[in-house]
Image (cartoon, coloured by chain):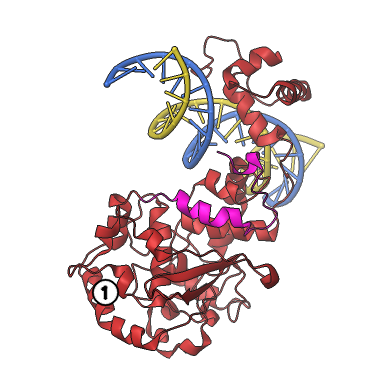
Chain colours: A red, B yellow, C blue
Amino acid sequence: MGHHCCSKQKVKRGLWSPEEDEKLIRHITTHGHGCWSSVPKLAGLQRCGKSCRLRWINYLRPDLKRGTFTEQEERIIIDVHRILGNRWAQIAKHLPGRTDNEVKNFWNSCIKKKLIAQGLDPNTHNLLSSSNRTANKVLPHTHHQQNTSVFSITTSQTNDMKTPLVTLVPPSDTNSINHIPISLHEYQSPSFAPTTRNQSGHSLMEFANSTDHLSHTFLMLSRQYGTKGCTGSETDGPMPFGTRSSMETTTVPSSSMNNVYGFGCIDENSMWGSDLEHFDPTRGEMVMQIQEQQHPQQEKGCEGEADKVNESISSGQNMGTSLMESSNFDFEFVESALLPCGMYCNVNPMDPLAWDC
DNA sequence: AAAAAGCACAACCGCGATCCT
DNA sequence: AAGGATCGCGGTTGTGCTTTT
């Protein structure tokens, strides 16, 4: 049985021979692919157009990197997967020269197992059962692990107190930081603004302190990127910061981090439990190396409102879900914020094969 | 040495989105 | 506006190589 697009033709299936590859390469490099359904005929191949397209995109394209994934690439995949879930094509866009298929295979064959070995659920990036966590804690590298996430984040307050800037910083290259200002106003698009307001009509963004702003930003990135089936519970979706539902927790000492993948594996007791009470905010160390410029007055003034929000959340209001379901927020916004800045290095924004889709 | 199991990766399939007529 | 063609994506299967028994 062939594809519906070529069911009338007699097509070859299975592995491609070097001769077939050569024909396809020669045709596309001289004529371009144009309409894929016409490629097999024009190139003299007994294949369907869909198969030709796949072969070209996944294997023959000249800009493909091939070879084993680097540690940096691995971290990028994990970090982006935390936000996007199984959106392999989107993840692959962050890895020039890599295809979605390649990323997907690497994830399934390698990363998934590593995460499980670390006691992490590869789907949610949250911790697995408590027994796994206990085992994980005794690993030699569990404490004082350097945050190796590709992201570092700083926030700063603009004149407009409602608009802290979130800056994503590539690791270990502080001389060439590409600051990515993400105005939280960007997220307050009319399409989802109503769902971010509490009963008193205040936008959550407006009364959160800047730490909470940041938490919310990534909560929203997580939500708005549309993790399938994300309901806001701690096991349901990739959640940056390990944020359980909203602002209830945003600060975590880096010493509570315990895996090589940066901010994924977090001691849950530290994350959600009493350890938070002992966290020294002056260290400014958070899951993603957050440094903040706090405004004490504003922060104090926000507490009451924040409590209201927590109250509404704890009373069963699932903000994440409501955002997911009601928002038309375009997650491509995030792409546009991240990609042109070359935050993952080696990115050529002009490369149509790398970035066009 | 041979069979079985495990693994990585290439390729296929089905479906939704988009384009075109 | 409707319907068919095409594209692009994610999940799944197939294939061949390596390791284990």
Vertical position of residue A352 compared to residue A165: above or below: above
Q: Residue at x 72, y 23 (%)?
A: A24
A85 vs A177, nearest the viewer:
A177
Vertical position of residue A45 compared to residue A231: above or below: above
List x then y, in percent, for residue A199.
17, 68
Q: Residue at x 68, y 45 (%)?
A: A97
Q: Residue at x 33, y 61 (%)?
A: A232
Left or right: A234 with respect to A351?
A: left
Q: Which residues are magenta?
A: A329-357
Residue at the left extreme, as displayed: A199
Left or right: A80 with respect to A348?
A: left
Residue A346 in view in this figure: yes
Q: Residue at x 20, y 69 (%)?
A: A315
Left or right: C18 with respect to A344?
A: right
| Residue A124, picture quadrant | bottom left
Residue at the front extreme, as displayed: A159
List x then y, in percent, for residue A27.
72, 20
Q: Report helix, strand or loop for mark 1.
A: helix
Q: Say which residue label 1 marks.
A: A310
Vertical position of residue A217 compared to residue A248: above or below: above
List x then y, in percent, for residue A347.
67, 52
Magenta-drawn stretch contains A102: no
**Quadrant position of the C terminus of chain A in the picture:** top right
